[in-house]
Image: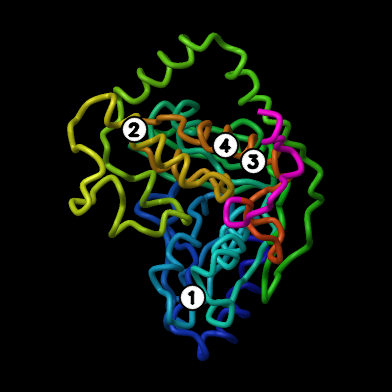
Amino acid sequence: MQYLDELKSKIKEKLPDLDVVIGWEQGFDPLRATPLFMRTEEDVDKLTWGPLCVHNLATYLTGLKGKKVGVVVKGCDSRSIIELLQEKLINREDITVFGLPCEGVISMKKVARAVGTLDYIEKVDVTTKGITVSAEGKDYDLPLTEVGADKCGRCQYHNALLSDVFIGDTIDDSAEDDYSDVTEFEAKPREERLNYWLAQMDRCLRCYACRNACPLCVCRDHCVAQSRDPHWMSQDDTVQSKWFFQMIHAMHLAGRCTECGECERSCPVGIPILLLRRKMNKQINELFDYKAGTKIDAKPPLMAFKVEEDNINERGW
C-alpha cells in the first residue's frame, strides 16, 4: 500500500521516545481494519493503511493523557486533534502526529448493499480507484466514488492539517461543502421533519456508541445521560428520552464537531446522526464564520465572549 513502508520506518524511529503509537491493523476479516496500539517494532510490522482505515484514532487521546502518544491521522482526524488542543483537553508536547494524505475511506453500509452481505468476505484488494471484494466466489469491483463514505465526497481537508511527520504527496483540497443535505432537509415541513426524527429515535438502542466513538465527547464518566447525582435524565426506553439525549448530545458538540462521522458509522441501527451535527455546524459557520478544528490558533466561538457579535443583532430583538 502506498506510503506504508515509509510510515512504518518513521514510526520505528520515533517509537523509543513514545509510550504507544496508535494506527490500524488487519481486522477479523479482509474488509475491516481495527485500531492497533504499537509498543514494539513487531507491533509496527502489523500496521496497515488505506481506504479500509475508517476509525478516527483521535478518540483515544484523552484517555491516554499524561503519556507520550503517537497517532496516525487522516485529514478529518487531524481536525479532531486541533479541536482537542484548542480546548486544552490534550497537551501538544505529549502528542506526535503522523499525517497522511487521504483520498477517502469506505462505507461498510454501501459495501454491504453492493455485495449483499458482509458475512462471507473472502478477499479484498485495494486498487487505485477503490476496492475489489471477493465474496461467495464472486468478485465485485467497487470504486470509491460509489462505496466511499458520504463525508469523503465533500471533504475539504484531505491532508492532515497538523502533523509532526507528514508522509506522502499532498492532495488538492478542491471539494466544496454547501450543506445542501441540511438545506434540503430544512425545506421540509416542520411536522414532516419532527416525524422523521421521532421515527429514527424509535429505532435507537440507547447504547451510546455514538457518544463513545466521538473524539470530542470527553466526559463519559460524568455524562448527563447516565449521571445519578445530579439525576438529569431518565433511563426510560421511550422515544422522548432518546430524542432528549440526542438533542443534548448535538448541543454539546455545537461549534466542536469536526464531522469525522464516527457517531453515524458506529450506530448499530444506522441512524443518520451526523445530519444533526451538520445542522449545528451550518449555524455556527453562518453566525461565527468558524469550522471546528481547521485553525489551531483559533478559539471555538462558544468558548469565547464578545459584547457585540458580528452576525447577531441582539439589540434588535
Image location of residue 67, percent across then percent down: 43, 82
Closest to the camera, between mark 3 and mark 1, is 3
- Element assignment for label 1: strand
Q: Is the residue 250 above or below the residue 84 in the image?
A: above
Three-letter amino acid code of the residue under disc 3: Ile
Q: What residue does disc 2 label?
A: 244
Quarter that holds the N terminus: bottom right
Magenta stretch in the rendered image: 302-317
Q: Is the residue 224 above or below the residue 94 in the image?
A: above
Q: Residues within 10 Å of mark 2 (few under 14, many from 20)?
A: some
Q: What residue does disc 4 label?
A: 280
- Structural distance between the alpha carbons of marks 2 and 4: 16 Å
Q: Quadrant of residue 12?
A: bottom right
> Is residue 239 on the magenta stretch?
no
**What residue is rendered at 19% in x and 38% in y?**
235
Circles 2 and 4 in contact, beta carbons < 8 Å: no
Q: Earlier in the sequence, mark 2 or mark 4?
A: 2
Q: What residue does disc 3 label?
A: 284
- Structural distance between the alpha carbons of marks 2 and 3: 21 Å
**What residue is rendered at 77% in x and 37% in y?**
176
Q: What residue does disc 1 label?
A: 21
Q: Is the residue 39 above or below the residue 135 in the image?
A: below
Three-letter amino acid code of the residue under disc 2: Phe
In this view, the residue in front, 194 or 134, is: 194
- Structural distance between the alpha carbons of marks 3 and 4: 6 Å
